[in-house]
Every structure is written in C-alpha cells, then in structure tokens.
Amino acid sequence: QVQLVEAGGGLVQAGGSLRLSCAASGRVLSTDSMGWFRQAPGKEREFVASISWSFNYADSVKGRFTISRDNAKNTVFLQMNSLKPEDTAVYYCAAGRPRSANVQSQYPYWGQGTQVTVSS
C-alpha cells in the first residue's frame, strides 16, 4: 500500500513563492519516479515536473520551478518561484515507474492534491 500526502499549498501573490511537499509511505523506492501534476478549473490535469534518474519540467514552469527529493525521508518537493496567476491549480503528487515521466496514466499512485492560488 502506497500513500502520498501533499502539503504546502496556499494563497500567494503573483511573483511570490511556495514550496510543496509530498511525503510517501509504503513501497516507494528511491529509484521510483515521483512527479507533480496540476489541474486548473475547467482544464485537464497536466504534467509539471518529475524526478527519477533525471529531471523533467513542463515548458511553462522551466526556470521557475525546481523539483527535488529527500530519499531518507521519502519526500519530494516542488519549489515554485515567480508564481503567476496561471499557476493556480490543484497540485497532485504521483509515484511510480512510468516509461514516460510526463504521462499521468503511467503513475499508479496519487496524492489527494493541494490547492495553490496565485492572485494578480
């Protein structure tokens, strides 16, 4: 049984920063991929970033967001800087062994999501 619990969401002004965390329990190995996805109101869920042996970022967040992990604590982080109103969404953590890191259907484990709201 794998559980993922996100934290760190909230309300921030444009240009501000937030740091999300995702604590994993159960059978998540340090070699497994962990990713962040987000879903804005009225839109489909989209890939944000992932980390395994390499890093992957969506073009929309490159240079602003940084994904990292602490294997000792089985936790992955998403540092979000220079936030924009269009970053407003529910952010989900995912874990698994996807063939393609940005394909959400290839992640079997998901957290409940945390709301990020960026005001203009």
Image (cartoon, grey):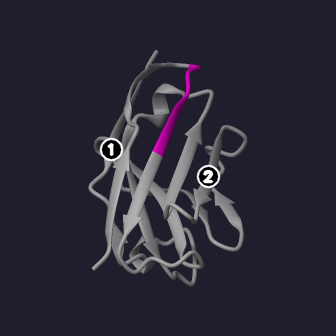
Image location of residue 111, percent across then percent down = 32, 60
Q: Secondary structure at mark 2?
A: strand
Image location of residue 81, percent across then percent down = 61, 31
Give the alpha-carbon distance from disc 2 to disc 1, as whole Å: 16 Å
Instruction: Identify residue type, mark 2.
Output: Ile
Image location of residue 30, percent across then percent down = 57, 75
On the image, which quarter does residue 56 sit in? bottom right
**Image position of 25 with respect to 100: above or below:** above
Q: Which residue is mark 1?
A: 114
**In the figure, is residue 96 to the left or right of 7?**
right
Q: Nearer the viewer, residue 73 or 96?
A: 73
Q: Quadrant of the image for the N terminus?
A: bottom left
Q: Which residue is mark 2?
A: 67
Is residue 65 one of those drawn in magenta?
no
Q: Which residues are magenta?
A: 15-20
Image location of residue 119, percent across then percent down = 42, 18
